[in-house]
Amino acid sequence: MSSRANVRPPPSTPAPSPVRRLRWFGVAAWALALGAYGLVVARSGSSPVDVLIIVLEFLRDHPLGAPAFVAAYALRPLLLFPASLLTVGAGALYGPLAGAGLVLLGSNASAVFAYLLGRGLGAELAGKALGHRRLTGMARRLRANAFEAVLTLRFLFAPYDAVNYLAGALRLPLAAFALATAIGSLPGTLVFVLFGAGLADLRALQAGDLPAPDLRLLAASAALFVSSLALARAWRAREARRAKAARRAKAARRAKAAQRALAARETMEPS
């Protein structure tokens, strides 16, 4: 027998998973952005603060600034950027009203985008989503009543992207998912937008001054935050009562079924 017959082919290298590819895409996007930022600073001689002011002016004053912000928010799952920072930034850039409107557009577009990712890459993304404690055991309920289940998870501040991926992997109705997301994420959106609007007026940076906080907006954000926590607590208590009632009803049905089975056996036995 020739020696070639004993030579085993080298093991094939497994192809990278789609989720890993998405992560590398996000890392590459950040590397490209940082490289472009360094190049602009080096060639223009501007300070980092000057470049920041240029970017802020574009986002706030240019006709394409707001659409660019919404697009960045929508692609946030790929860019690995925290939603909370973008939401606070929207309040600081555009004020409470316009900022809230842009964040609602961007966050819902981001949720739908992550939903579609979960629908296309459901096996791996859903496994990661189900690892969260708050989402354990929710799959059956999500399928049974998608709108109410998604709304409950939003009110309870469940992991935002995990809910999106799980809803997509379970192929929930997109309309019910999007509507529940828009309603359920509204309190949190207003909290962070008001906080950003009250934290700083970025126009002061153009004059070389430090932004001054707006105490009224900060107080409104704090009050809404406390109210949101109270709402989440009340909603959680409601869900606990409903789950307890469901367990009792299930136990009662099992007891009745056992009684009927016992009665049927007794009638079939000879006297």
Image (spheres, grey):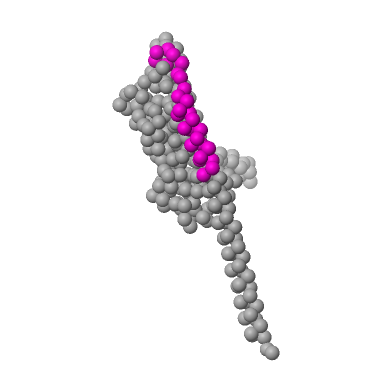
Q: Is residue 209 magenta?
A: yes
**Residue 17 percent location from the top left of the image:** 52, 40
Residue found at the very far top of the displayed protein: 45
Magenta segment's dominant SS is: helix
Where is 122 relative to 83, above or below?
Answer: below
Residue found at the very far left of the displayed protein: 63
**Residue 210 percent location from the top left of the image:** 46, 16
**Residue 205 percent location from the top left of the image:** 42, 16
Residue found at the very far right of the displayed protein: 271
Q: Is residue 99 magenta?
A: no
Q: Nearer the viewer, residue 168 or 263?
A: 263
Left or right: 126 as drawn, with respect to 61: right
Labels in figure, total: 0
Q: Nearer the viewer, residue 20 or 13?
A: 20
Where is 176 relative to 217, above or below?
Answer: below
The quadrant of the picture occupied by the C terminus is bottom right
Q: Residue at x 44, y 32 (%)?
A: 193
**Residue 192 percent location from the top left of the image:** 47, 33
Residue 114 makes an appearance in the image = no
Q: Residue at x 46, y 19 (%)?
A: 212
Q: Residue at x 39, y 22 (%)?
A: 56
Q: Residue at x 47, y 25 (%)?
A: 215
Q: Nearer the viewer, residue 204 or 54?
A: 204
Q: Which residues are magenta?
A: 205-231
